[in-house]
């Protein structure tokens, strides 16, 4: 097809984590999904909405969700935009800020989808490598880029940057610092205060992990009203369907259920990390709903294969910076117990 834009014809396209057709026959720890169901309030709200009213368009402004999120996080709704998954808002941030040939940046390793989105837009990508102490190397003292994506907690490694570091980084940028907080609900800190105090910080969140709603495609961003207004010009006007809108409101309202699920996952994460260390793995202190674990022989591919043969799916990255280990999502306690058993069966810890 000669009519294709050159960058689209030449790009590889993003490859999401493997979703097997018979997912129920695996212990599925490869895409950081939540092992617990969404709040019963969410299911009730969806069922109630799933009726005759679907013939009407949804609220183009997603007002109810923005108000609920604003109340929860302490922002006026004019600082909130709802998104069809946080991936949608990451895409629209690039479209809003980075023109063709302009520069966006992120840390390697982190979420490589930023690079894919930039490629589509024709923007330039610059990545900064991490030291052994998880400090990005070589970011200029005054850095002229349109957008800098900082995944915090880092995915897939799971460490966090301090708020002091994030504030300093924001101060060095001429453009916008996007803190991708897909996993912040499992961490001890977040950057919402920086959105309030600094004029170039944007926070993105997803309902896919901590709210067990990966299948609903829900995310949001919190930013200054000028930024939200720009993003509103770009998005599909009906970006959230009626079911997603009521699901978002119900999920945010049921904080008791949310806190209970997050607490269980954090507890399981602590147990699982300690068990991995007992059988000789190196585990990066985890702040998301996953651990990045390195087996004693530093062969992440073999680890992946051995677990796969035992019908346990984890995520192995062939990237040279990540190939020595694997990212293992935190499932239910029972799933993690069975994973440890499988690892012992594979010979680790002997
Ligand atoms: C899962 C994830 C997202 C995407 O979330 P969706 O809301 O499902 O689109 C964005 N960033 C990171 C770092 C993620 O892990």
Image (cartoon, helix red, strand yellow):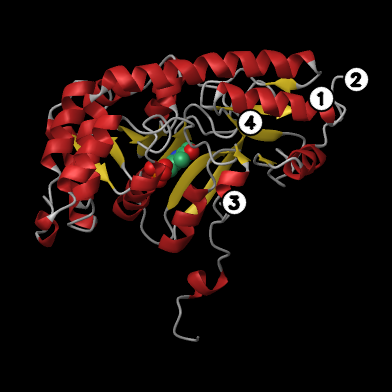
Disc 3 secondary structure class? loop
Picture coordinates of residue 68 (x, y %)?
17, 29
Q: Is residue 330 above or below residue 65?
A: above
Q: Helix or strand or loop: what does disc 1 sit on?
A: helix
Whole-percent x and y of residue 286?
A: 58, 20
Relative image position of residue 184 (x, y in whole percent) = 42, 25
In this orientation, does residue 145 appear? no
Q: Residues within 10 Å of mark 4 (few under 14, many from 20)?
A: some
Asked if residue 47 shows in the view, the reply is: yes
Sequence order check, earlier mark of 1 and 2 = 1
Q: Which residue is mark 2?
A: 350
Q: Look at mark 4 in the image and give the residue it sits on.
A: 130
Query: Is 161 placed above or below 228 here?
Result: above
- Tell me which numbered mark, 3 or 4, is placed earlier along the sequence: 3
Determine which residue is flagged by label 1: 344
Question: 10 Å neighbourhood of mark 3: few (<14), some, or many (≥20)?
Answer: few
Give whichever of discs 1 and 3 has the lower sequence position.
3
Could you say which disc has been placed on residue 18 in the image?
3
Task: Estimate the spatial distance between the alpha carbons at disc 3 and disc 4, rounded to whole Å.
Answer: 27 Å
At 22% from the left edge and 37% from the top edge, which residue is drawn? 44
How many labels sit on residues? 4
* Residue shown at the point (44%, 62%) measured from the top left: 120
- As measured in the structure, the alpha-carbon distance from the residue carrying label 2 to the one carrying label 3 is 31 Å
Left or right, residue 283 beside residue 241? right
Asked if labels 3 and 2 touch by Cβ distance under 8 angstroms, the answer is no
Give the distance between the C-alpha atoms of the residues marked 1 and 3, in whole angstroms: 25 Å
Q: Foreground residue, 334 or 301?
A: 334
């Amino acid at each position: 097809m000669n009519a294709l834009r050159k960058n689209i014809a030449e790009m590889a396209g993003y490859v999401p984590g493997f979703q097997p057709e018979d997912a129920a026959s695996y212990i599925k720890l490869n895409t950081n999904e939540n092992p617990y169901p969404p709040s019963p309030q969410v299911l009730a709200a969806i069922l109630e909405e799933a009726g005759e009213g679907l013939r009407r368009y949804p609220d183009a402004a997603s007002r109810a969700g923005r108000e609920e999120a604003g109340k929860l996080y302490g922002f006026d709704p004019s600082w909130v935009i709802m998104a069809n998954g946080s991936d949608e808002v990451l895409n629209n941030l690039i479209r809003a800020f980075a023109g063709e040939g302009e520069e966006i940046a992120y840390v390697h390793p982190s979420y490589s989808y930023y690079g894919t989105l930039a490629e589509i837009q024709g923007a330039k990508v610059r990545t900064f490598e991490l030291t052994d102490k998880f400090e990005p190397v070589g970011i200029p003292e005054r850095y002229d880029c349109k957008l800098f994506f900082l995944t915090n907690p880092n995915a897939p490694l799971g460490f966090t940057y301090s708020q002091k570091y994030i504030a300093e980084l924001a101060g060095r940028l001429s453009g916008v610092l996007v803190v991708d907080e897909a996993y912040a609900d499992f961490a001890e800190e977040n950057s919402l205060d920086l959105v309030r105090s600094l004029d170039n910080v944007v926070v993105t969140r997803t309902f896919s992990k901590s709210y067990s709603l990966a299948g609903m495609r829900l995310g949001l961003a919190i930013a200054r009203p000028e930024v939200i207004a720009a993003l509103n010009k770009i998005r599909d006007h009906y970006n959230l369907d009626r079911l997603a809108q009521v699901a978002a409101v119900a999920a945010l309202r049921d904080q008791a259920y949310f806190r209970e699920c997050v607490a269980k996952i954090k507890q399981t994460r602590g147990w699982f990390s300690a068990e991995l260390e007992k059988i000789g793995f190196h585990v990066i202190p985890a702040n998301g709903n996953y651990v990045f674990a390195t087996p004693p022989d530093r062969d992440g591919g073999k680890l992946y294969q051995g677990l796969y043969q035992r019908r346990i799916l984890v995520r192995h990255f062939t990237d040279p910076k990540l190939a020595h280990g694997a990212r293992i999502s935190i499932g239910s306690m029972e799933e993690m117990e069975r994973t440890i058993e499988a690892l012992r069966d594979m010979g680790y810890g002997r």
